[in-house]
Image (cartoon, rainbow, N blue to C red):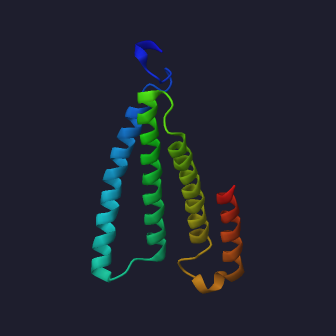
Amino acid sequence: QQGGSHFSIEQAWAPYLSAMSLLGFTVFLQSLGRRCHGFWSRTGSLHPVIWALACIVAAQYLAQLLLLLHLAALGRDGRGLPALEALGEALLAATQAAQTSLMLLVGMGYTLTRSRLGADLRVVLFVCGVVAAV
C-alpha cells in the first residue's frame, strides 16, 4: 500500500472517522446520563423504557469502542483483532434487534397498556429473540 498503510484507499479514513464518531457518542452518552440522573433525582425513578434505551445505548457505545480498537490494531499490524471485530459487530446486531423490539413494544402501547399486551408481548419478544440469535 502507498505510504506503508494497511488500509485500502476506501478504508484510509476509517480509524479517524470511527474515533470522531466515538467522541460524538461520548458527548451524547454524557448528556443522556446527566439528563437521566437529573430526572431520577427529581422523581425517584426512571421508566423501564428509559432504562432499556440507556442499556441499548451503552451496549452500542461498547460495540463502537471494540470496532475502534480493532481498527487501531489493524493499522498497526495489518491483521487487527478479529475477535473484537466479531464481538463488536454481534453486539451492534443485538442492539439493533433490541432497539427494534423496544420500538415495537412502544408502538403496541406498552407504555400505556402494559397489562393488556399479554400474548402479543410474548410473541414480539420471541420473534425479536430469534432475530437477535440469528
Say which quarter of the image contains residue 75.
Answer: top left
- Name the foreground residue: 6 vs 99: 6
How many dots with numbers? Answer: 0
Residue 131 spot, x, y in % from top left: 68, 58
Kindly identify the residue that appears in the image at 49 percent across and 34 percent down: 80
61 left or right, relative to 36: right
Determine the residue positioned at 46% across, 32% down.
74
The percent position of residue 93, horizontal first and vertical second, equals 58, 52
**Is 133 placed above or below 126 here?**
above
Eyeballing the image, is 57 above or below 124? above
Q: Nearer the viewer, residue 65 or 20?
A: 65
In the displayed orientation, state which residue is furthest to the bottom: 115
Location of residue 12 with respect to 32 vertically, above or below: above
Residue at x 34% of width, y 46% of height: 24
**Where 98 falls versus 87 (above or below)?**
below
* Residue 125 falls left or right of residue 37: right
Q: Quadrant of residue 33?
A: bottom left
Say left or right for 26 vs 99.
left
User: Which quadrant would the C terminus be assigned to in this image?
Assistant: bottom right
Q: Position of residue 21 (x, y in %)?
A: 39, 42
x then y, percent, for residue 56: 48, 61
Q: Is residue 45 left or right of residue 111?
A: left
Residue pictured at 47% horizontal, 54% vertical: 60
Of 67 and 105, nearer the camera is: 67
